[in-house]
Every structure is written in structure tokens, then in C-alpha cells.
Amino acid sequence: MQQDTTKIIRHTITRLLAKREHSQRELLAKLKQRDLPEAESLSLIEEFKKANIQSDERYAEAVVRGAQNKGKGPLFVKRTLEQQDIFYASAQQYMQEERFDWFELALSVRKKRFGNEIPIEFNDIQKQKRFLMYRGFEDEHIKYALKPDSY
């Protein structure tokens, strides 16, 4: 019975990681949902980590790329990683290496949603600020996206 459980856990982890990157916490939660023993699941996840098949760093990189493709900002990335108990510093290092320009992303997201015209009315400015804040952009990115000379 023990060997069957190990085989099931190993197969499940392999199948999940074949689809996309998962954090350690995410894998453990999905294995718990299937009523698989936690201690055994954790030890097998550690084996996958040692073999570099599962990596929280690669998961963080995937979250950053996905957020950028969806027009989400760095605060969205930070929240997502914190929910998975992954340090934001590993994602920041990746973002610096890849030279992500959150300012230009905020500008393009704003333009896509609201057009090229800079808002003049207070209510319009607030509406666009709220939109960008909701998307996870920081204040400095929002100010850049709303200033006239950023075009």
C-alpha cells in the first residue's frame, strides 16, 4: 500500500509540473485535496526540488512573465508570490536581469483601456488611477502613465 501511495504521489506531481510551474505550497495543497498523506507528499516534493524539477524561483519567474503579459504591475506579482510563501526578492532579481519596464507597461495598459488622451477632469484622473492601482502598479508608475510628457 505504501509503495502504491508513493507511486500515485510521484505521478501526480509529475503530471502537475508537466502542465506548468507550481510552487511547493501549491503542489502540497493539490496533493492534500486528493487526500494523499502530507508527510510523504512533502518528502517527494523535496526530491523533485533536489533534482531541480520543481523550483520556486522558476515559479516566480513564470508569475512575473504572466503578470507582464496580462498587463499587471509589480504589486500584483508581490501579492501572488506572498500567497505562495515565496520571497519577492527572487522575482526582483529576475526582473532586474530581464530589465522589465513597469513604467512603459503602465502607460500601455492605460492607453489600451482609455485611449491616448490624457485625462483633464478630476474624476477621469481618479478613475484611471484606480484602474492602474487595481492592476497592481505602484504610485510612481501611475504618475508616469498619467503625465502629459510620457507620450
Image (tube, grey):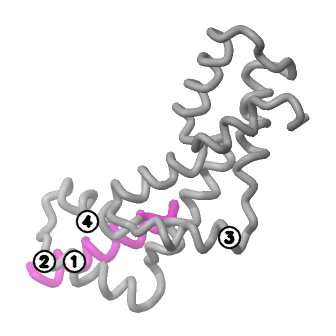
Region rendered in magenta: 1-22
Residue 28: image tag:
4
Q: CA distance from mark 3 to mark 1?
A: 32 Å
**Who comes first in sequence, dot 4 or dot 1?**
4
What is the x, y in percent for residue 61?
58, 66
Under mark 4, the amino acid is Leu
Between disc 3 and disc 2, the foreground one is 3
What is the x, y in percent for residue 86?
39, 67
Under mark 1, the amino acid is Leu
Q: CA distance from mark 1 to mark 2?
A: 5 Å
Dot 1 surroundings within 10 Å: few (below 14), some, or many (20 or more)? some
Q: Dot 1: what SS? A: helix
Q: Which residue is mark 2?
A: 39
**Who comes first in sequence, dot 3 or dot 2?**
2
Which of the two residues, 98 or 9, is positioned nearer the viewer here?
98
Residue 20 vs 79, above or below: the answer is below
Look at the numbered discs 4 and 1 and tell me whether their residues touch, using CB distance below 8 Å. yes
Dot 4 surroundings within 10 Å: few (below 14), some, or many (20 or more)? some
**Who comes first in sequence, dot 3 or dot 4?**
4
Which of the two residues, 94 or 46, is positioned nearer the viewer here?
94
Q: Dot 4: what SS? A: helix
Q: Dot 3: what SS? A: helix
Q: CA distance from mark 2 to mark 4?
A: 10 Å
Look at the numbered discs 1 and 2 and tell me whether their residues touch, using CB distance below 8 Å. yes
Under mark 3, the amino acid is Gln
Q: CA distance from mark 3 to mark 2?
A: 37 Å
Q: Residue at x 46, y 77 (%)?
A: 55
Q: Which residue is mark 3?
A: 96
User: Position of 2 compared to 95: left or right?
Assistant: left
